[in-house]
Image (cartoon, grey):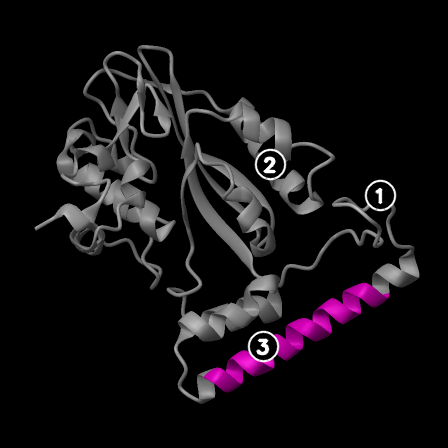
Amino acid sequence: MGYGARVVADSVAESGRRLVTMEVTFPRLVLAEFNTHRVFSRNSASSRAIPIKKQLVRIREEPFVPATWGLNQAGMQAEREADEETAAAARTAWLVARDRAVEQAEELLRLGIHKQLANRLLEPFMWHTVIVTATEWSNFFALRANPMAQPEINQVATLMLDAYRGSTPVTIPAGGWHLPLLQPEERDGTFEHSEEARRISAARCARVSYLTHDGTRDLEADLGLYRRLVDGGHLSPLEHVATPEADGAWVGNFHGWRQLRKTIPNEQDFGLVS
């Protein structure tokens, strides 16, 4: 794994409002910074969902290791980089910490502790994949694709900006839908306009992949996941699937688009469901 950003759906309404969904990968340690941007709808690969044995393999073989080692000083930004000898020692210390985290995660596994806890020990060394959808991107790019930002979030934001600029949106007419992670062969002109397609797209956004955790594509599994999401009130994945708003107004955190989430009764508070 490593840094990555790719556009998985790029749509523009007849009003001119553009809606873009990206799949991005970056170090887990800057997820909190990424999540401060409230215009984003986002779903992440879950530390609770991914089997710990799979995580352990990833952490051993492809851990996140900082590419630069800024020297300690007052303030939020390191202005000077460590020399080659210090950087090498810092990298060794980081990997020793990785080894200790793996050892203790394995011990929790041996004790029968659930992955929702055991995986947490591994998070500083994880790469993290997110599905993110928004109509408003300029503020994020201004703040994060910026040398003043932490290097790790600056790197992925710069990749995202390049992907955004390099993508050409598809015009979606009134009544059409923005459907991330629907595959090319599923866009046959009939299926992509169905309610089933919208549900499958939302489920895949929840999983952050068009594949199940077992590595297969399974439409029935997608539909089953969608039902569990809606029945349980876990509606954030439904935000990535959207249709143009007739008057181009704001709906939720999107400008000119209405999310599938907004079609679910009491979507704002499942506590109101009797």
Residue 268, given in percent of the width and then of the height, sits at 24, 40
Q: Which residues are magenta?
A: 89-108
Label 1 to label 3, Cα distance in Å? 32 Å
Disc 3: which residue: 102
Residue 87, given in percent of the width and then of the height, sits at 85, 59
Name above or below for residue 124 compared with residue 79.
below
Disc 2: which residue: 157
Q: Main secondary structure of the magenta part?
A: helix
Disc 1: which residue: 79
The amino acid type, in three-letter code, at marker 3 is Val
The amino acid type, in three-letter code, at marker 2 is Ala
Mark closest to the chain's N terminus, 3 or 2: 3
Residue 150, given in percent of the width and then of the height, sits at 69, 44
Residue 261 visible in the shown view: yes
Disc 1 is placed on an element classified as loop
Disc 3 is placed on an element classified as helix
Frontmost residue, 31 versus 185: 31
Do tag 1 and tag 3 residues touch (Cβ < 8 Å)?
no
Q: Is residue 7 left or right of residue 96?
A: left
Mark closest to the chain's N terminus, 2 or 1: 1
Frontmost residue, 162 versus 97: 97
* Residue at image point 74% right, 34% down: 147
The crowding category of the residue bearing disc 1, from other C-alpha atoms within 10 Å (few below 14, some 14 to 19, many at least 20), is few
